[in-house]
Image (cartoon, rainbow, N blue to C red):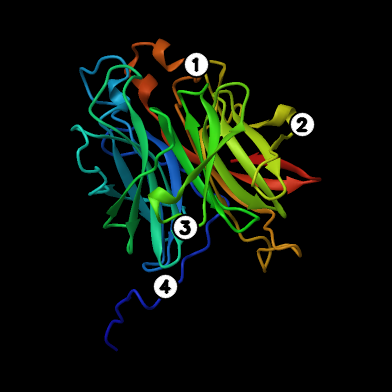
Amino acid sequence: MPQQHQTDETPATIPPLRPDAFRMPYRDPVWDGPTDPVLVADHLKGEWVLLYTQRRATAPGLAGVEWVHGTGIGAARSSDGGATWRYQGTVEGLTPPGTELPATLWAPDVVRIGDQWIMYLTVLGGRRTDWTGQADIVQFASQDLANWEYLGRIDLDSPRVIDAAVARCGDGRYRLWYKDEARGSNTYSAVSDTPGDPSSWTLEGVAIAGRPHEGPKVFRLGGSYWMIVDEWRGQGIYRSGDATGGWVRQEHLGGLVLMAPETVDGRAVVGRHADVVPLPDGTSGETSDGGTQRALLVYFTHPYWGGEDIDTMAPDPRIRLSHVRAAVLEVRDGNLVCIEH
């Protein structure tokens, strides 16, 4: 029988994401510094795609925080539900026109909207040794997760916005949450009815105030909407009825998870900037109110560094290394809890 070739019109079957995905932590084979992971289901090829910021952790002779600049977006694929990953190189075509080269690309989020994938990406121009410079969130579109068309920059009325997260809310509208480093490093939001159009986003204001944080992610689980944010001491947890606002911090365990998924020299290593993907729950994967009860929490750690101020890192070259891991989130008695591997 001749081999059947997959076409864009014939979706492939994607192996279910495994609760023990990333039991063997993922390491970037080039620079050994994968951070800011996001998982995307590729129904065309029947695989899971891991996209991440490819920090240049092992590059020699770099000063300050230059190793987190000049970064591309790394890609890996899995055909076994996340048990193993095949490195695919860096994603091409993600430098907007007019960007100072070499470009710095951070923290992609990818959402399936209509018949295409939309990527929301942080872009800075050039390589810097400190945390200065303008940072923007831009959009790209793709039909195959490999070739990306630049759509434009989102105007968020700030010179320094990073870490985009996009989801459809209970009111049927899409919201973009992000870290505004010019406004206290808090989470702000914008709203759109046509999220494929960068000019359609309307700024709403602060969504999560208080102590500085980054890396928001919004998802639905157990019939509620949740937001996690990276507080550099673990992931902070907030809950909302419809994700349009009114975020309330979880009281259970101080509203934190991933406080110490690893340790180094007796000190806690915290889980950093994460993605969340629902897992099948039983046979149907859904509760009676339409929400799943379990999800995979995909995050990164610095296995040789406790996670203190990045500007005070020791000169030990291992300190910069990172890898991607995962844990399971569950809703129990109304609380979001984490089951670490």
Which residue carries the number 3 mark?
A: 194
Q: Is residue 274 above or below residue 7?
A: above
| Percent position of residue 303, x then y | 46, 26
Q: Residue at x 64, y 47 (%)?
A: 243
Check whether the beta carbons of the residues at disc 3 and disc 4 lie within 8 A of each other: no
User: From where the camera sits, is residue 179 visible?
Assistant: yes
Q: Going from the N terminus, do you reach mark 1 or mark 2 first?
A: 2
For the N terminus, the image quarter is: bottom left
Q: In terms of secondary structure, where does tag 1 sit? A: loop
Which amino acid does the dot numbered 4 rest on?
A: Ala
Along the polypeptide, which appears first: circle 1 or circle 4? 4
Give the amino acid type for the residue marked by disc 2 in the picture: Glu
Q: Report the residue marked by disc 1.
A: 308
As helix, strand or loop, the secondary structure at mark 2 comes to: loop
Residue 58 percent location from the top left of the image? 27, 26
The residue tagged 4 is 12
- Return the residue nearer the eye: 88 or 210: 210
Q: In the image, which is nearer the foreground, mark 2 or mark 3?
A: 3
